[in-house]
Every structure is written in structure tokens, then in C-alpha cells.
Image (tube, rainbow, N blue to C red):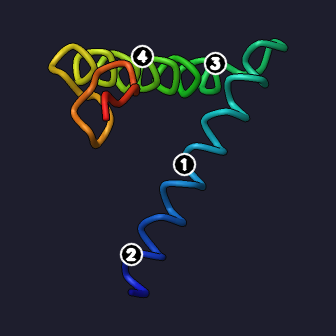
Amino acid sequence: MSMILIVLSVVLLLVAGGCACVVWAGRGGPPWTRAVATATLAAGELVRASRRSDGRRGGGDLDGSADGSSNG
């Protein structure tokens, strides 16, 4: 259980740091913040694209309907 907590904490810190670099780079930060911001935004686009592709494969609700309505 503690290993999962450590991994999730590290992921949370990376996400928070990436978001901070996006804001800092937007305000004219040093070049390394622009590189981290670019990587953060690219990772976000990859996550968004993977979620879109999951939805096209029929990732509906637990009852199997794609729109969330049940017929019963």
C-alpha cells in the first residue's frame, strides 16, 4: 500500500510541477521552463487522445449503453 502511495505522490508532484512550468513559461520564464511546458502539454494531448480512442471502442457505462441510458 505504501508503494502505491509513493508512486501516486510522485505523479502528483510531476503534474503540479508541469502545470507550474506551463504558467511560468507563459509569463516569459527561462528556456528550460518552455521545454518542460512543451513536454507537459504534449503528455496532456497524448492522454486526451487515448481517452478519445477508448470512447470509440464502445467504452460506455456498466450497463453496456454508450449514452448512459438504460432500457430496463
In this rendering, position of residue 19 left or right of residue 58: right
Q: Of label 4 and label 1, which has the lower sequence position?
A: 1
| Outermost residue toward the left in this view | 57
State which quadrant residue 36 falls in.
top right
Q: At 64% across and 18% down in the image, what residue appears?
A: 31
Query: Above or below — where is 48 with respect to 72?
Result: above
Pointer 2: what residue?
4
| Outermost residue toward the front in this view | 72
Pointer 1: what residue?
14
Secondary structure beneath label 3: helix
Secondary structure beneath label 1: helix
Secondary structure beneath label 2: helix
Q: Nearer the viewer, mark 4 or mark 1?
A: 4
User: In whole angstroms, how far apart are the C-alphas of marks 4 and 3?
Assistant: 21 Å
Pointer 3: what residue?
31
Q: Residue type at mark 3?
A: Pro
In this rendering, position of residue 24 left or right of residue 64: right
